[in-house]
Amino acid sequence: MHLPFTDTQFLEVFSGYNAMFWWVAILLWLATSFLLVQLIRHHGNSVTLTVLAAVHWLWSGIVYHAVFFTPINPAAWGFALLFVAEGLAFLWFGAVQRQLTFRFEMSPRAVVGLIFLIYSLSYPALVVWSGFRFPLAPGFAVPCPTTIFTVGLLLMAVRPVPGWLIVVPVIWSVIGGSAALVLGMTPDLALFVGGLSLLVDWALPRAFRLATAL
């Protein structure tokens, strides 16, 4: 996979981003941690979680992709549009249509979702553990942990989840995961597992209904 930027350019994007918006990353990390605890304790509010997910996607799309990433990668304009679309989709399906309900229960699906959620919160520490150092490294409130967080959240959702909501996370799991192989960003390899998990979670109930109908 050929990238239109060097490793140094990529890490310098994070340096500028972290220098300006470190406080946003901290606030979003704290808000996400708090709401995750509430979800586990069965006190989570589905609309609040939906809005949080929308904020993650809109922030990464507008601020990270459109403002910081486009100078070294023109394709980031397309990424920005995808991320904004995902954020608006969360607002539409979850806050306006009220089609999303999140609940933690001791089922394999929810436990896998919880693992992804905890992984997303652990992402900054995993990046440091893999050999990168701040500010020249991704932390929180950037595309890859946002996608991993979303995988976990959607696996906590009571079915059916609108299929539109998995499209962008699956696309980014391929893009971000492939870039991780080239850049050596090993924490991002979880994106492949996340994207596959969403596809399996979406397809299995439909395959089961088709099999029973036959």
Image (cartoon, rainbow, N blue to C red):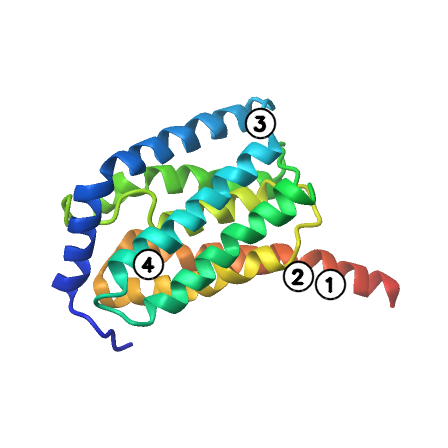
What's under tag 1, amino acid-wise?
Ala
The image position of residue 203, as x and y in percent, is: 66, 61
Name the residue rendered at 61%, 34% in the picture.
46
Residue reaching furthest to the bottom: 2
Is residue 18 visible to the viewer in this orientation of the structure?
A: yes
Please report contact status of discs 3 and 1: CB closer than 8 Å, yes or no.
Answer: no
Q: Nearer the viewer, mark 4 or mark 3?
A: 4
Callout 1 crowding tier (Cα within 10 Å): few <14, some 14–19, many ≥20: few
- N-terminal of the pair, mark 4 or mark 3, is 3
Name the residue rendered at 39%, 41% in the picture.
119
- Numbered badge on residue 65: 4
Residue highlighted by disc 3: 44
Residue 83 in which image quadrant: bottom left
- N-terminal of the pair, mark 4 or mark 2, is 4
Name the residue rendered at 33%, 49% in the picture.
142
Alpha carbon of mark 4 to alpha carbon of mark 2: how far?
Answer: 30 Å
Residue highlighted by disc 2: 203
Please report contact status of discs 4 and 2: CB closer than 8 Å, yes or no.
Answer: no
Which type of secondary structure does the marked residue at label 1 adopt? helix
The image position of residue 5, as x and y in percent, is: 19, 70
Q: Classify the position of the C terminus by image quarter.
A: bottom right
Which type of secondary structure does the marked residue at label 4 adopt? helix
